[in-house]
Amino acid sequence: MAVWYFAYGSNLDQEGMRRRVGEWLDLKPAILRDYKIVFNVFSSSWRGGVANIEESPGSVVYGAVYLLEESQLEKLDKYEGVPHLYHRRKMTVEVGGRPLEAYVYVATNPRPRLTPSSSYLALVLKGLKKLGYSDDVIHSIRMQVER
């Protein structure tokens, strides 16, 4: 059975996703309302903070939904460190203004705010740009990091 997965961090990089899970069935830009992207999970491989989400009424997380086979989602669970680093939960995202149930990874033990490495942030922003997000969206995420 195929399932939707909402990506908001390094999994926006389509080349990286392809290496992790193989070819997906579908990919679309999507948003998660009333949450914001934060960088409060430490990654030694990225040498800094990596993406997580936290509740924030009125905010929006920009990302993408991938349609994956369950076996691909299990591969992604391993990559994301489920259940130690992240847990997976079902949430309602929007695709083209319509609600869609999708799995989302949320950190199990977030830290105080961390700074992402420039290479990690560049990868996330490149993924959003490739999905067709505007320069304003890219700039707003960059500003969140600099605050």
Image (tube, grey):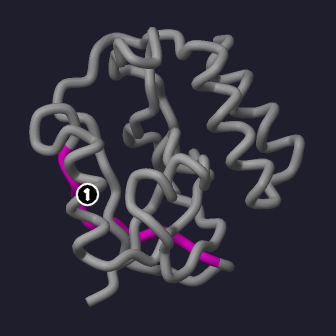
Percent x, y for residue 18? 51, 58
* Number of residues whose C-alpha sits closer than 10 Å to that of mark 1, classed few (under 14), some (14–19) or many (20 or more): few
Asked if residue 58 can be seen in this view, the reply is no
Residue 51 percent coordinates (x, y):
45, 32
66 vs 142, left or right, is left
Predominant secondary structure, magenta span: strand
The quarter in which the C terminus is drawn is top right
Q: Which residue is mark 1?
A: 75
| Amino acid on which disc 1 is placed | Lys
Specify the segment rendered in magenta. Answer: 87-95
User: Image quadrant of residue 72?
Assistant: bottom left
User: Farthest residue toward the bottom?
Assistant: 1
Magenta includes 90? Answer: yes
Q: Relative to 58, does residue 26 appear above or below in the rendering?
A: below
Instruction: Kindly identify the residue that appears in the image at 65 percent across and 34 percent down.
Output: 123
User: Residue, x 21% and y 62% (percent of image)?
Assistant: 74
Q: Nearer the viewer, residue 33 or 18?
A: 18
